[in-house]
Image: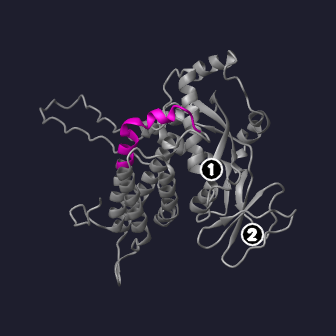
Amino acid sequence: MAKSVANGMENGIAGRIEPSLQDVGTRNLGAGAGDVPVAARCGDAAPPPGATIVVFNADGQARRPAAFGGKAVVTGKGEAAWWFGTGPHAVALVPFPAAPELGLQLAFVIDSADPRLARQRFDLFLFSEVAGQSDRLVLADLAGRIEGALRGALEQGTLDLPPCTSLDEWNAFRAGLDRLLYMRFGITVDDCVPVELEDVDFAAMLRQRAAPMVPSVPLVPSLPSIPSAPAAPVPLAAPVLPPGPGDAAALRRLFLELPDATRTLRLLPAPAFAVRQAQLQRLSLAALDVNTMPSLAWSAPGQARGHGGQACLGAASAAAVRALDELWALLARMAPAGKGGDEANDDRNEGGSNDGELDRIVANLAFHLAARRGVGADARREPVP
């Protein structure tokens, strides 16, 4: 992949290297650069010079007041002030876990306020995924979230980065990556180039892969051979899923992001009005299901739920969050050509393939929310159109 695209860059077709990569790439990718704060809660201290201020109220509504020099931000009752640096920022990503030596060097900036939007996407990301769990967002954490979204889109098929990528395939991947990161995090990609990462510990990777292997039983040559029954086949290990968020953090994301995802879907062009209306209704019912979700600790008034039951319900909420991430990735693919878009996107929307994928994601989301509520597969549910 890197060699094919690099050949195109040598020919001058895509050889543009943004100043952001030259200026901040070494600083942000160097030792200790992962601790560089991208956003943090203001508190009583003044925000850094040049930072953008965003104030959240108790309902999650955000506003971006103007910063006055080095003075602290004055907030009202129930409000919390955050600052973030617009960048440019540079990180190194590994799109494929099986090939950790092939990376992408990504330069991006946090998008400025769009007056057409009721809530900026980065503000939603900051309040939904960061504000409830931590007081700061460092560059390494943001890079990990971007890398997870990229890997999920590649596994889902909304992005494609084949081996020996041609220049046209690379441009299509870049356009899809731009839409994904803008739709998911509210950031604008400045430049993205393939690089070969050198700090890869292949020995540690081999040890990690060999850990779940079952050791073979040694043969004892002194004992006489006794015919025995054929050994039972060793079951394959279940795939290890990445650790999901806590139940409260998962429900927080679902509560805050599902209405915005529904609003985004409503603004996209629909091939059939009835189909889109049914999809919007199912997403609205999913949001209503999240709003009325019962407590994790109690199965009934005065009856506490056991640890095993809490773990099962927590796993269901984490699975619902993964379905939400798939929904954002698909919405980025369905977005028309425009900001971060390309002309080939309209061709991919033909044939109803995106609508079929959307139906699958919404059905999985409803299933996981029902499991989080504690409704069994054989329980009666109201029919959903």
Residue 335, position as x, y percentages in the image = 52, 43
Identified at 56% across, 48% down, the residue is 183
In the picture, measured across the screen, residue 308 lies left or right of residue 64, that is left
Identified at 41% across, 74% down, the residue is 295
Residue 302, position as x, y percentages in the image = 35, 84
Q: Total marks drawn?
A: 2
Q: Nearer the viewer, residue 257 or 194?
A: 257
Q: Above or below — where is 305 with respect to 197?
A: below
Residue 92, position as x, y percentages in the image = 64, 37
Q: Nearer the viewer, residue 230 or 235?
A: 235
Identified at 66% across, 43% down, the residue is 188
**Amino acid at pointer 2:** Gly
In the image, which residues are magenta? 341-359
Residue density around tag 1, few if under 14, some if 14–19, many if 20 or more, within 10 Å: many
- Residue on which disc 1 sits: 186
- Residue on which disc 2 sits: 43
SS assignment at label 2: loop
SS assignment at label 1: loop
The residues tagged by marks 1 and 2 sit, at their Cα atoms, a distance apart of 24 Å
Type of secondary structure dominating the magenta stretch? helix
